[in-house]
Every structure is written in structure tokens, then in C-alpha cells.
Image (cartoon, helix red, strand yellow):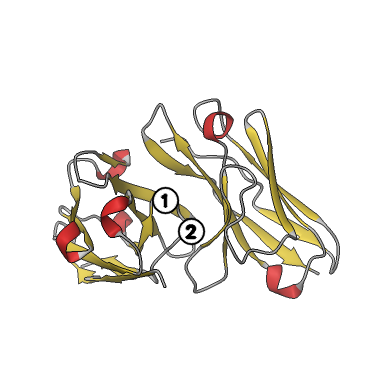
Amino acid sequence: QAGLTQPPSVSKGLRQTATLTCTGNSNNVGNQGAAWLQQHQGHPPKLLSYRNNNRPSGISERFSASRSGNTASLTITGLQPEDEADYYCSAWDSSLSAWVFGGGTKLTVL
Amino acid sequence: EVQLVESGGGLVQPGGSLRLSCAASGFTFSSYWMSWVRQAPGKGLEWVANIKQDGSEKYYVDSVKGRFTISRDNAKNSLYLQMNSLRAEDTAVYYCARNKLDYWGQGTLVTVSS
């Protein structure tokens, strides 16, 4: 099953803004939007946003998501050292009847 | 508090079988689709399978179709993954998650090796 496309790595400075992208197609991202997950080394993933910009309780407002067509984006403002992690996007693919994930973006906070 | 606790992982030889379990608590288990997601060492996340609330619908990633079976027991608040004909490429940490990906377990490691 084809996955979503994410850049392998992004590096930004402390207190800067990072925008991560995730490209799919009309059957997944373009249909129901994307979820974004954060994963620190050795820990399970944590949901940051679902269906584009719905944040679960407890997730900082510094994390915001959006979508334009078949591309979803996660913007992280005021970068902190603890934001250094792997970020994954995911979407339900209606043609595959399957969840598809991006390959993940490793965010480095300089 | 929502909790998902996986168990059943371990070392198994190629061609062998393993059954993973996930014990759920803190929410009405029977009201949610549930998923299994895996992560090979040093790799990204891969969705494996999911199951509807009453078990009447199940979906699988192509690479495990015919080998893995997802099931659930709502009376026991438990999710299962029966894995047969295991291959080296099935080596991964297997996570149990609510289908909306909002809650995840800590994962259980499955290693397929001779």
C-alpha cells in the first residue's frame, strides 16, 4: 500500500517556527484530512492533531495543523528542545480501506 | 485513565506463530474500532490491521493478509493479533491503538529469527 510522503528531516533553531509537510492523494489526505503524531525515541507515538486541526486535550497550542488539497501541514511555533522528535502523518485511505502513514520527519532543534 | 497494555511478544523462528494480546481499560472498549500498528527497528510506523466494534469488519495491510488475524473479546476488553507464518520482516514493536490513533499502548517486541 502506498504511503504518504514526508521530508526525512527538518532542522530549525530554538524559538523558531517549523512547518512539516505530508503529501497524499484524494483518497486519503484530500478526503478525510490527516492526523499528526509525535514520537520520542523509545516511546510510543502521541497524537498531536486529527482531521487537520483538532487537538486532543493537553496538546499545546504551539502545534497547529492545516490542509491544502492533498497536502497536510503541521506548524510548530516557538520551538523548544523537547520538540525534537520524529513526526508522522497518517490518514485513512478510503480506496485501500487502510490507514496509511508517512515515512516520518525527524525534527532537529538547533 | 485510558490504558492499553500489550503482551505476547518474543523471539520466534521463521514460519512460526505468535499471539499478541492487548488489555484495554479506562474507556468503553466495545464502542471503538481498534488497530494494531507496528514499527520495525529504526523504521517508521506501519498500520497492520483494524477491527470494528463488534468484530464484523476487519481490514489488513497487504503484507499480512492471509497470515495475520485480528480479533477482539469485548467481554474481556481485549484485542488480539494472531500471527502465523512469521517472516524476518515482521520483526517490529507491535502497538495496540484506538483506531483514531488517540491512545497507544507501550508496545510489545516481536523478533523473528533463527
Task: Tell me the amino acid under the disc marked 2.
Answer: Lys
Please state which of residues B15 and B7 is positioned toward the viewer in this rendering. B7
Q: As drawn, is B7 to the left or to the right of B85?
A: right
Does the image show residue B29?
yes
Q: As drawn, is A63 to the left or to the right of B1?
A: right
In the picture shown, does residue B105 fall above or below B61? below
For disc 1, the chain is: B
Mark closer to the observer (2, 1): 1
In the picture shown, does residue A28 fall above or below A54? above
Q: Name the residue carrying label 1.
A: B46
Question: Which element type, helix, strand or loop, lies under badge 2?
Answer: loop
For disc 2, the chain is: B
Task: Tell me the amino acid under the disc marked 1.
Answer: Glu
Seen at 17% across and 63% down, the residue is B19
Q: In x, y percent, where is residue A26?
A: 55, 25
The quarter of the displayed image where residue A14 is located = bottom right
Q: Which mark is residue B43?
A: 2
Labels 2 & 1 near each other (Cβ < 8 A): yes
Please state which of residues A1 and B80 is positioned toward the viewer in this rendering. B80
Query: Mark 2 and mark 1: span between their CA atoms?
Result: 9 Å
Q: As drawn, is A5 to the left or to the right of B56?
A: right
Q: In x, y percent, where is residue B112?
A: 25, 64
Seen at 38% across and 58% down, the residue is B97
